[in-house]
Amino acid sequence: MLVVWSAWLWANPYQGIWHDARVYLVMAYRHLVPEAFERDVWFMFGSQDRSSLFDEIYAALLRWGPVDATAKLVALGGGVTWVIGAYWLAHAVIGGRAALWAAVFLSVLAPSYTFIDSKIFVLTEAFATARPYAMGLTLIGIASYLSGPRWIAVLTLVIGLALHPLMAVWGLLALAGYRLPDRAFGLIFALGVLLMVAGATAGLDPLRPMDELWFRLVQSTSTIVFAPSAESVALDRNFWWLAMLLLAGRLGAARFRKLYLVVACLAAWAFLASVILSFHYPAVLLAQAQPWRALWLAVAVGIVAAVDVVVRLWRSPNGQHWCLFIIATYILAEGGIGGTLLLAAWLLYISPRTRASLTSLWNHLSSPSQRFVYLIFILWLLGFFFISIMPFSYISRIFPGTDFTIEVPEIVTTLAIPLVLAWITSRASETTRIWLTTFVVLFALLLWDQRTHAQRLIESRYSPYGHATMMGIAYHQGDVVYWPENDMGPWFELATAGYAQNLQGIGIVFSRDHAILLYERLRRIRALQESTNWDQYFSEYDLHAPFYHRGQWSKIALTLLCMDPELDLVILSQQIDDATSDVTISQGTTGKRYVYKCSAFRNSQTAEVPKIELSSASPLPLPRTE
């Protein structure tokens, strides 16, 4: 297991508090100082922490240590949980030396499990969220159910559901399908689909479609929930995992073939449901359930299935050809044809006559002709790999305690090195393996934290109790702050409510009121500036669009913004002419920050906030300031 963990450490360097680690951290903050975030748009209408215990546990840990160190520890714990789950499942299904390689592949490969052509969510995560814990515990639960003891399966699945129900529930459904007779599973599955269709037809409130404005906001902002276009749907990549599971349902270990097929069935339904939600009927409840999350289980079990099939085919007649073909299609899936080829191979396999005809055609070729076909295919595959994939995948490696960095191909540091180290340690003698593995783990831990010096400095300032002494009398936790040049500043450096932040666009699928209020505030900000070049690249419904964050301010614009009674403070890097800042903060090399109290502007003005009608989803005219 230490070999697998060292591989995970090498392949998944720690990059700090980014991605969804930011929203999980602020949810933990809220448990420590709930009054500070009562007026934050992200919490005003409920948030995802109500269905998870992860944030309460995270908050408890934050009581005992600094934020940056705690976040790093939580991220490391998630990696350990995932490694244990990967190792346990691989040994339960495959066993032997092949299980080690399956676990290593689960820990070093980072395939995306979204239904769109994006890598925003990958199987292995090295930041502090509930997902790696829930996924790792789900794999442990499946492995324990298959190989015992089953009380561990019950315990780990319950904990996984408590930490992240949208991720862990698919493991529970997979085991239910594995346990039930085929006809019973098919009947229950079909009945569930019919009930949802009947409920939507009858107009049940949870199954009603989103209104047009809410749908457009979610589709433009959260593309993982609704595909923005048909071209963005990752058909081929998901076809590969589906085809691999179907092949394993025929060629894998006999005892686990049903598991492969059940996971394939769940993944196919989840993919189809996500497409229907995106382009035909965006039912509220189903959109919030996010069925695409089932694809993580298809990817994880698909990796184990691939190793299972390759091991069993390798020594069979022409089996090595099939193994090379599977590896090639995996590489080609990044280019949009690998999944289709593997799915076609599965169709050929279940058609004995067609397979026999192709085998006969191949055998009729002379040995030189066969070698020539191999050579052409391998050269084409290598050319595709190095031309289409390698040049765009570089990563910076930072040496601890120094500012020295080196640019290396990502495949070298996250795939080649972990696999080579795993191969060397697995073949060493027992004594050598212990010492070598210990050294590799310690060295990998030393290099694991890849944050820059600047990022470490920024994260060291994060505190759930803010910096009231630095801000003086102008700032109190609970104030609503707009800080356009520091999107994370209100939440993490001040630990108070944000007015309109990029981060607040996450999770708008769970509340229409959240989406509309944030949209209204961002449109008000955008109304205070002239059109920019960004306008042509982003939809106005994309709440992450950079044109919603103004760069230059005037007293008129600041006054109009402050007419919103919900806004207390504005922090800018520029001093506004004829406007007096309440506090001036000097932050070293980043320069000065000027804090403006909105109450002062409201008391001196009689203007009202421009009213923006949001009754339709059509583009709205934006008022401009001269």
Image: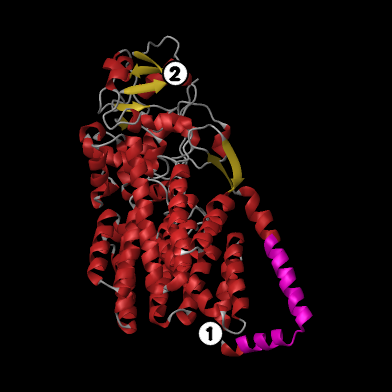
Q: Position of residue 365 (x, y in %)?
A: 75, 84
Quickly name the residue at label 2: 588
Quadrant in which the N terminus appears? bottom left
What span is in magenta?
Answer: 355-382
Toward the top, the furthest residue is 578
Q: Position of residue 523 (x, y in %)?
A: 42, 34
- Viewer-closest of 473 and 124: 124
Image point 44% across, 14% down: which residue? 576
Residue type, mark 1 in image? Ile
Out of 446 and 335, give the one closest to the viewer.
446
Q: On the rendered structure, is 421 left or right of 430? A: right
Dividing the picture into quadrants, the one containing residue 349 is: bottom right
Q: Which residue: 42% across, 68% down?
A: 301
Q: Earlier in the sequence, mark 1 or mark 2?
A: 1
Give the residue pinned by disc 1: 350
Magenta includes 371? yes
Q: Tell me the CA gap for discs 1 and 2.
A: 68 Å
Q: Is residue 467 visible?
A: yes
